[in-house]
Amino acid sequence: MDEKYQPGEIEQRWQKIWEGNKSFRVTEDSKLPKYYLLEMFPYPSGEIHMGHVRNYSIGDVIARYRRMRGYNVLHPMGWDAFGLPAENAAIERGIHPVKWTMENIATMRQQLKKMGFSYDWDREFATCEEGYYRWEQLIFLEMYKRGLAYKKLSTVNWCNQCQTVLANEQVEEGRCWRCEHEVGTRKLDQWFFRITQYADELLRDCDTLKGWPEKVLTMQRNWIGKSLGAEINFPLEDKKKGELKVFTTRQDTVYGATFVSIAPEHPLVLELSRGKDEEKEVKEFIQEMKTVNQARREEPDLEREGVFTGAYCYNPFSEENIPIYVTNFVLMEYGTGAVMGVPAHDQRDFEFADKYGLPVRIVVQPEAAEPLEAAHLAEAYLDEGILEASDHFSGFSSEDAREKIAAFLEEKGWGKGTVRYRLRDWGISRQRYWGAPIPIIYCDACGIVPVPEEDLPVVLPKDIELSGAGGSPLANHPEFIQVSCPKCKGNAGRETDTMDTFVESSWYFARYASPDELKAPLNKDRAAYWLPVDQYIGGIEHAVLHLLYARFFTKVLRDLGWLGINEPFVNLLTQGMVIKDGAKMSKSKGNVVDPNFLIEKFGADTARLFALFAAPPEKDLDWSDQGVQGAYRFLNRLWRLIYQQREVLLQVKGGAPGKVSADLKDLRRQIHRTIKKVTEDIEKRYHFNTAIAAIMELFNALSAMREEEWAKKETAALVKSGLESIVVLLYPFVPHISSQLWEELGHQDNLEGQGWPEYSEDALEEEQLLIVIQVDGKVRGRISIPAGASEEAIEKEALADPKVSAFIKGKQIQKVVQVPGRLINIVSEG
């Protein structure tokens, strides 16, 4: 054992041992309880960053802890390898995406191995491998057979910088989630997954996810957005052009509708203005809206704008013609693409009516309050109330009126009660190269033809030219496009769009259960053993992207017969960000800390210990150079103490002493209290920072032992058991130094096979309690009493204490307040 702690040598040694022994390779074992621990897999960008270090360190603590508790632990790693960054990098650097991706994977794999994470590397895969996306293509075909995958013309978000379509979830504050450029709209033929077919189940099953943060569930519920309401038909003034169908959740306000708003994408919008004075202005407004993405048009602070179409429709309830406006705040993708404008009871409509001078008509009055007057409204009245000016519905409450008006609509044939969701079907077409090819063929004679299963995978060609120009590069690759129709054998062409990269990450967690399965996407028996994932770890930013899609795919795979579960993840931990200089670490801000530098200078264990000790997992971690150095100093102190006392410790035979003399009982109690604290902090709360703090406190107590105490056999035995407890408790956090110190303490078995230490309830019991005595809130004395003494006995001892009696002499005692086991406060008069 070297006197100096050498993390580089120690870590390389143990990483080789673990790899050589395949220490973390796992197979199904019905005799053991299983535990599936998974962190969201990384995009192979080329370097791991401190966010990775923190995320994967959190996961590794849980995985190693569960193994020590006797679980059969699956802890895999792989690569989310398709996507725009690789293609953009290839264009910028003149390197093929395959080469760029695989080189990055090799680099990051080595970095992760240097961190000592306990992955089963035999299960590793990259989603750009044919053996993975082949099965994704099969899933697509099965979904197509069942109508869950379909193609339609749609207004889509379009990023000019990335030259591709983006799902609504991929537009953040009006910008592309990848390149951060402004996003506009286009009309394109697109492939969709019918996620809306599962909307009600996705919403309902949120209630079953007891191990998920409420914030994430709220975000998902809001994104799915179930709305109970009604469809109402407003006949057009020109009866030949039909009617406008609107959706509303507030049919109780229909008598207050003074205009109708329609989306710029509505199929009737040009027809309504054709031949009218307003036609030119309407066309210009529609063209302008193509430059504004849909996410921006939904934002609350959007200035309400619109243009009168020159057309009117008939409100069958108020029996009047009302104007039709094309507006920027109505989307074709939601509802019917048309809404009734009720300025008195909808804030958007109120702002729009105020800007364009439209009538405001109050039809719902608040109960038990002064009646509202339209002329004095400063904002829309949005709450429930009692209807007025609503014909025979006047006098009813809003809730009752909604039910009665829905029934009246159906009776009159004017519409019907209905349920709508904010959730839209998932557009998966991407006009780029680096993605899984969509397995569809187009034949002039046969139309859309699925690729036969025996012809899978449709392989992404490697000999591709990436120019950066718009559209899919696959469209310029004749050998890829040109194919015989599987039905008629005539000339046909392949689909040149590739799948959204979120498709790959929507089922990868299931593939880890059987990554070597060659006959199906999943081996049902092995999937049944491992799934669902017991603990999933990743960022909150994926709440309505990856996590919602993964839930959807799980339900689809269940209905296709490959899975037997309803939800993919039992527990979800959303870790905080790593912050430096007041901002999230990023290259653009110049505040990045290189994990490689930390590993080289301080060792992986120090990097792990700091990341786990600096903050609870769910909170942001503020970077601190002093914190890193503090973690390194602690590991050095631990190493040095064991080095200095190693010969004494090796002479101790047997385990921890069952009984100790009176002067050692406090130390024995602290050892067991620490075991209990660390166990509960990992098991129940994931409060790794407080667990580490408790270990440090125990170490301080052991290192404070005087030299002459070490010579005593009983003391040495207890101290050795304390140090061994520290080493075992630290193992999930800092496995390299712990494994080495375990060996230096004379153990032949590797530490990863060691069971988790148990604490003794008997040892935790305190024979004497130190009670602080206050008089009128000020400390006046302390007494030592037997544990378990009654409140009456404690009060009697406190009042009899000579130091206390001097402060209460001649005073009337009003009451005595006790904090059990800690404090007693005597409250007096005067």
Image (spheres, rainbow, N blue to C red):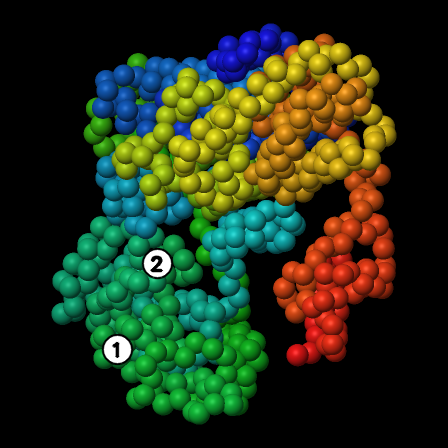
The percent position of residue 660, horizontal first and vertical second, equals: 83, 30
Q: Which residue is mark 1?
A: 354
The residue carrying mark 2 is 298
Distance from Cα at disc 2 to Cα at disc 1: 19 Å
The answer to whether residue 337 is left or right of residue 571 is: left
Would residue 318 be visible to someone looking at this image?
no
Q: Which mark is residue 564?
A: none
Q: Is residue 364 above or below residue 418?
A: below
Q: SS class of the residue under badge 2?
A: loop
**Residue 725's x, y, as percent?**
70, 26
Quadrant location of the C terminus in the rendered image? bottom right
**Circle 2: residue type:** Glu
Of all residues, the one furthest to the bottom in this rendering is 370
Q: From this view, report whether residue 771 is shown above or below residue 715.
A: below
At label 2, counting other C-alpha atoms closer than 10 Å, the crowd grade (few under 14, some 14-19, many 20 or more) is some
Q: Position of residue 403 (x, y in %)?
A: 56, 76
Name the image quarter holding residue 329: bottom left
Which residue does the image show at 31% across and 42% down from the upper left? Answer: 176
Front-most of residues 63 and 702: 702
